[in-house]
Amino acid sequence: MSVNSVSNVSLILEIKGKFQINCELKRHLSPKTVGIITRSIPLTGNVHKFGISGIYFIAEITSGVERAKCEFKKGDIAFYPLGKCICFFYKDTKSSKSMTPIGKINTNIDDLTQAVVGDEILFYDDTG
């Protein structure tokens, strides 16, 4: 279990009934957005597919684009402001949509390929 710090927030991404993945939100990537998400934890939603490179869920978080990027690496976590979605990438991808980088997946990235559209996502603090 990781310890939260001023710059990093350890979270669990759980696909209910299937697996858990350790994630870390990094404030230095996008301080405003990470702060809003952190204050909104725990979050729940349903799995949607981001093409063949990731999954996302609608988090109903309101924040503008911060330090926008369109290219993401395997293991990156991003926030898509227009859709109010948090995205988790299991393959390198180049998106036509500008997103805010917010963190990294620390363990079991390839487990994300087992998620099916409609699965329940829980995104919560790993301290319980």
Image (cartoon, rainbow, N blue to C red):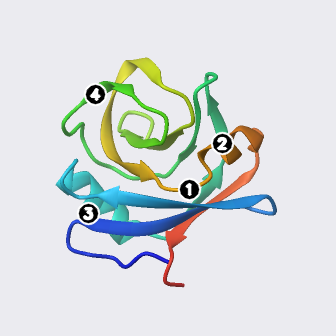
Left or right of 48? Residue 38 is: left
For residue 69, the mark is 4
Q: Is residue 37 above or below residue 50?
A: below
Q: Label 3: state its secondary structure.
A: helix
Pick whichever of labels 3 and 1 is earlier in the sequence.
Answer: 3
- Residue 82 at what x, y percent from top left? 38, 33
Q: Is residue 44 above or below residue 48?
A: below
How dense is the environment of label 1, judged by Cα within 10 Å: few (below 14), some, or many (20 and up)?
A: few
The answer for how far apart the CA atoms under marks 2 and 1 are is 9 Å
Residue at 79 percent of width and 58 percent of height: 18
**Residue type at the position of mark 4:** Lys
How dense is the environment of label 2, judged by Cα within 10 Å: few (below 14), some, or many (20 and up)?
A: few
The answer for how far apart the CA atoms under marks 3 and 4 are is 19 Å
The quadrant of the image that shows the C terminus is: bottom right
Pick whichever of labels 2 and 4 is earlier in the sequence.
Answer: 4
Depth-wise, is mark 2 or mark 4 nearer the camera? 2
Depth-wise, is mark 3 or mark 2 nearer the camera? 2
Residue identifier under label 3: 35
Q: Label 1: state its secondary structure.
A: loop
Depth-wise, is mark 3 or mark 4 nearer the camera? 4
Residue identifier under label 2: 110
Pick whichever of labels 3 and 4 is earlier in the sequence.
Answer: 3
- Residue 2 at what x, y percent from top left? 43, 75
Which image quadrant is residue 121 in?
A: bottom right
For residue 107, the mark is 1
- Asked if disc 3 and disc 2 are in contact, CB closer than 8 Å, the reply is no
Which image quadrant is residue 98 in?
A: top left
For residue 61, the mark is none
Pick whichever of labels 3 and 2 is earlier in the sequence.
Answer: 3
Pick whichever of labels 1 and 4 is earlier in the sequence.
Answer: 4
Depth-wise, is mark 1 or mark 4 nearer the camera? 1
**Residue type at the position of mark 3:** Gly
